[in-house]
Structures are given as structure tokens and as C-alpha cells.
Amino acid sequence: MKYDLMTKLGDLLKDPQAVEIIEKYVPGLAKNPMLMLVKKKSLESLLDIPQAKDAGLTKEMLEKLLEEINAKKADA
């Protein structure tokens, strides 16, 4: 499965390879209990959340993250 900006955060967090890469960029994020509130949102919709903006989350950052995750999955 190839991930994109419409992928739900919860689906991404079910993938151990994806979590490994997310943790590389944002240590501790995958274990943050606050994620339960947004795990049904698409990655793109996270960009509208003020806390995500304040943390510096950008579309470019998500695209880079997805590119790395998809490349790792293609190599597996």
C-alpha cells in the first residue's frame, strides 16, 4: 500500500516501518496519547490543526516523510 496525504494517521501508525520513520523525525510522537484524538484524520487535514502548525508541521514535511516511508516499503 502506498501512502499519500489522504492516508489516515491511524492507518500510518499501524505500520511499524512507518512508525520507525516518524519517530526519526519526531521522537515520541507515535506514543503521544493525544494522537488518539486525530488518528481518524487524513495527514493533509492535520495541517489545519493549530498545534500542528505551531509545531512546524508543513505539507512539504509530510510529503518528505511519505516519500521516505513509501521508498522503504518498496524496498521491503
Image: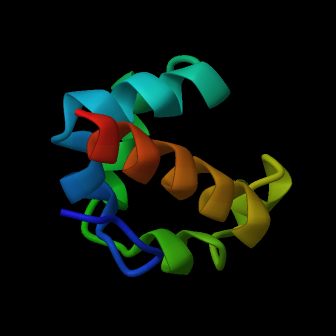
- At x 51%, y 23%, the residue is 23
Q: Is residue 20 above or below residue 47?
A: above
Q: Is residue 55 above or below residue 23?
A: below
- The percent coordinates of residue 70 (x first, y second) are 40, 52
Q: In the picture provided, is 47 more to the left or to the right than 44? A: right
- The percent coordinates of residue 46 (x first, y second) are 55, 69
Quadrant occupied by the C terminus: top left
- Total numbered labels: 0
Q: Is residue 58 visible?
A: no
- The percent coordinates of residue 25 (x first, y second) are 65, 29
- At x 63%, y 64%, the residue is 63
Residue sitting nearer the eye, 33 or 16: 16
- Residue 16 sits in which quadrant? top left
- At x 33%, y 58%, the residue is 9
Q: Is residue 45 above or below residue 24?
A: below
- Residue 2 sits in which quadrant? bottom left
Quadrant occupied by the N terminus: bottom left
- The percent coordinates of residue 74 (x first, y second) are 30, 47
Q: In the picture provided, is 42 more to the left or to the right than 49? A: left
Q: Which colour assignment does the render follow? A: rainbow
Q: Is residue 33 above or below residue 48?
A: above
- At x 65%, y 79%, the residue is 48
Residue sitting nearer the eye, 68 or 51: 68
Extreme residue in the front direction: 75
- Residue 31 sits in which quadrant? top left
Residue sitting nearer the eye, 41 or 7: 7
Q: Is residue 34 visible?
A: yes
